Amino acid sequence: MSAKTKINDLPIYMAEMGERAAKASKTLRLASGLTRAAAILAMASAMRSRRKVILKANAEDMAAAKTKGLSASLLDRLELTAERIESIAVSLETIAALPDPVGMEDAHYAPPNGLKIARIRVPIGVIGIIYESRPNVTADAGALCVKSGNAAILRAGSESLRSAIALHEALVEGLKSADLPADCVQLITTTDRDAVGHMLGGLSGNIDLIIPRGGKSLVERVQKDARIPVLAHLEGICHSYVHEDADFKKAREIVFNAKMRRTGVCGATETLLIDAEIADAFLPFIADDLIQAGCELRGCARAREIALGMKAATEHDWSTEYLSAILSIKVVDNIDEALAHIDTYSSGHTDAIITENTTAAAQFINSVDSAITVHNASTQFADGGEFGFGAEIGIATGRLHARGPVGAAQLTTYKYAVRGDGHIRPV
Amino acid sequence: MSAKTKINDLPIYMAEMGERAAKASKTLRLASGLTRAAAILAMASAMRSRRKVILKANAEDMAAAKTKGLSASLLDRLELTAERIESIAVSLETIAALPDPVGMEDAHYAPPNGLKIARIRVPIGVIGIIYESRPNVTADAGALCVKSGNAAILRAGSESLRSAIALHEALVEGLKSADLPADCVQLITTTDRDAVGHMLGGLSGNIDLIIPRGGKSLVERVQKDARIPVLAHLEGICHSYVHEDADFKKAREIVFNAKMRRTGVCGATETLLIDAEIADAFLPFIADDLIQAGCELRGCARAREIALGMKAATEHDWSTEYLSAILSIKVVDNIDEALAHIDTYSSGHTDAIITENTTAAAQFINSVDSAITVHNASTQFADGGEFGFGAEIGIATGRLHARGPVGAAQLTTYKYAVRGDGHIRPV
């Protein structure tokens, strides 16, 4: 197998893909929840039965990536193993087992005119997903779309295209075995970069929503150029704020976990705020914990007076998502200064307060305008799985439709069913 | 008073308006529901106390509009009277009395990790509203935004700008009397058409959502040029489908009401579909009702064989929103043909089935992919007031965020509050 990199007429190729997706979405929208779940279970089986083919395709991607000189971390993201394919299959089974998000009546209204009105969750339609090198996104994104009744158009990173093609064949096998159209999940098989531009234009109204999943430059381009709705987060500049009434033991554990559990995830804390009242008593200990674990600290002037071993934080640090073992630290006078700092610098992803003071916690949760506000827990819980949503396709920090983890339920919209018995509207 | 039509530097004027709106929205977001309601009640009082000033400004708009030769129906939309101002005040009081849509926890999650997660409704931020000649939109839109905690930037039609300025002064009086910033509701006081372009660009991220309210050409331009999310409907090509198991008495009343109650509203039925099985027995009667009431009928060949007095419908008729006393009529073989017709021609606004057959009704509601599906009631119930939402700012037919009537609740988004007790995330 080799990645197809040439398509003779890209506009026609993309336009036809959009039309097929729109057509397939109509079938998928009316398919039962059992059929959709059966397709996803069959996708999981196909992942296992096609393991050798998938590994072979991935080996070709890996060889090409090594030739190109990709970094070790990119190679790690790209690599599939027997264990990783098994974990893809298990993830598909988890998605299949989620409650059906389609058809649920999530609100009812009984206005004085006597009508009975229900709000019903329905699929969005066609979702375009643009991602980078992790092959598992092909499976997760495709399955989450099918679970929520949406057709998907997938655009994988060029370095993982051979793997994506092999994984996609397993998804199609699953769809076919449940008598669903193969076009429910389509993969773009050209590496032509203009394909993304076509997706961002919406393919003549045939894509309803774009979800980019990858690094900042990808998301930035999508947000800038898309002419259709986008669910995404550009970055996660997350804060942990240790309030003067914090329990120090909890605070040490939470802050350490929020920064160091995984430093490369979007929910990792990038800035620690500490009330001046407790900075002397708390900061040296957490600073020591972090330094021992290899974390670089960049403090404001007051923080550097209290604890040793910090570099000076510059203005730039407060607006930087490190995604590595670096933490900026600022001592604040009180909760108002903490809230003002977060209001200025947060990326609207996830921000936490650590305190035993319920009034302060309530003030924080009410005031912080981020998708996820946290009290006495690690910001690294910012994840659809941890929310109980099953798999997630990403985290959204925009204002419309869905904020925070985007799972199958967030990939639905609603319509109303208005039920009368001959009701006419008076003039 | 005269409408200000010249702004020396429009980009700066608009940019500063955006910044003021973003700043005011932060104050408004944290204001209590009682404060927001008090502001709206004070707006209502100010409408009454400023009645003479408002009428004087409106008289100037009317005089200019007559000089320009505006149509009688446009003049009627533009005109304010003492009664209409009273009804604006009453509408504001109704909005003030709505349940507070902000701060409500509308979902709870208790995942296995032990966290308690709540989803909380919060304001969207800053909403730009672009409308045409009806002066009451200034008051309704401004008040709905304040009710939902959103700052508003209003752009009125040029012919109603003097009225809008006078009404806006009453809104500002209400805001001030509740100690809210005047910038919570701003009105663009230039008629420069480029102001709309600036709004559609989002004012450097300071507008979160655009709502156009007006005719098709306005909505078309907004949907085409907006770089930020839009809630709108382009048109309402609504269908009433009389199924073979319909109760004829109900069907006659519903279809008549759906077409003729008001022919100029977006929820008016534009196409009648009738099962062939009952066309002979039903069509002549409803056709007679409609013709007697002055409605022009345009039928398919089969319909014209059954009832007299119809013109021939062309392909163009099925995709036309008449907004007047014209109805297209098609005889269909069965529900599948009706569903296929709706799938092809509906604008996704509101479509109805009339039947006593609950299986057919369920099939219709499940299959029709419109914002509002109706069983045994008039399509003219497509209205936020009739849904019990209080006032509405419009009807949305897009796929994302909100579909159907957009009232105060639909002008909110959500965030999560994650509550732990020292929870850290395992590796």
Image (spheres, coloured by chain):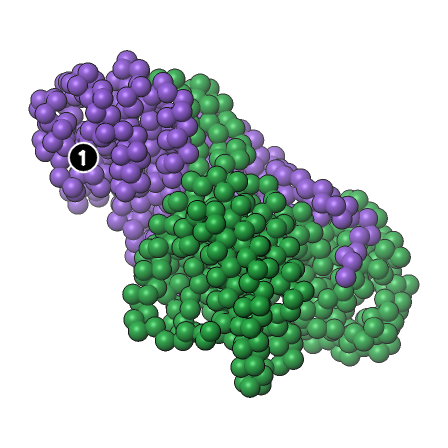
Chain colours: A purple, B green
Given residues A301 and A109, the one toward you in this image is A301
Residue ID for mark 1:
A72
Does residue A424 lie above or below A350 as drawn?
Answer: below
Which sits in the foreground, A368 or B344? A368
In the shown orientation, is residue B294 left or right of residue A159?
Answer: right
In this orientation, does residue B218 appear?
no
| Three-letter residue code for mark 1 | Ala
In which chain is the residue bearing label 1?
A
Residue A139 quadrant: top left
Count of marks overlaid on the render: 1
Q: Residue furthest right?
A: B281
Tell me residue A312's x, y (percent).
Answer: 10, 33
At 51% from the left and 59% from the top, the residue drawn is: B170
Residue drawn at x 50%, y 42% is B35
Quadrant showing the C terminus of chain A: bottom right
Badge 1: few (under 14), some or many (20 or more) residues near its Cα, within 10 Å?
A: few
Is residue A82 rendered to the left or right of residue B366? left
> In front: B288, or A170?
B288
- Identify the residue at image location x=59%, y=59%: B48
Image quadrant in which the N terminus of chain A is located: top left
Residue A74 position in % (x across, y down)? 23, 38
Task: Residue at 41%, 74% (x, y): give it.
Answer: B4
Residue A121, image x and y in percent?
Answer: 59, 42
